[in-house]
Image: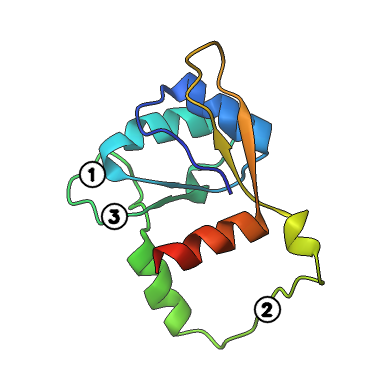
Amino acid sequence: MICSNPSFTAGELCQQLKISKANLIIGHSSNIDVVFSAARLADISPKRIILIDQSKSLSHHAPRIPNISDLIQLGSKQKLDFQECVLDPGEGKRKIALLSWSSGTTGKPKVIKCLQLSAITHMRRCV
């Protein structure tokens, strides 16, 4: 997973998508045009774009872009068929959970790796 800056241009977002080898984008309707442009540049199918919000006015993007609520609704109708990912002891100290990027104030943004243990520790502190 990567986190991106919503003010990025399509070119900047494309760079992140290519470096991270992303194959799915979850975006916000407020910057969906940038998301679609970046996806096209990174050779990611528009079918691999999901909205985090429920947009009312994206009629120029056909077919309708699914959102998180759509996926939750679809998933709730499916039989549960997954295997929980359980890390081996100490694996959380080595396994990458997400990639984040620096602001790029001194040049191109640089990748920052966030490990599983760090992400889980941060989430626990937030709850």
**Image point 73% across, 62% down: which residue?**
92
Q: Is residue 17 above or below residue 66?
A: above
Q: Amino acid at mark 1?
A: Ser
Residue mark closest to the camera, 1 vs 2: 2
Q: Is residue 41 above or below residue 106?
A: below
The residue singled out by tag 3 in the image is 53
| Real-space CA distance between mark 1 and mark 2, rounded to the nearest whole angstrom | 38 Å
The quarter of the picture where residue 107 lies is top right
Split into 4 quadrants, where in the image is the C terminus? bottom left
**Image point 70% across, 80% down: which residue?**
83
**Image point 28% across, 43% down: which residue?**
29
Of pointers 3 and 1, the one earlier in the residue sequence: 3
Of pointers 1 and 2, the one earlier in the residue sequence: 1
The residue singled out by tag 1 in the image is 59
Residue mark closest to the camera, 3 vs 1: 3
Of pointers 2 and 3, the one earlier in the residue sequence: 3
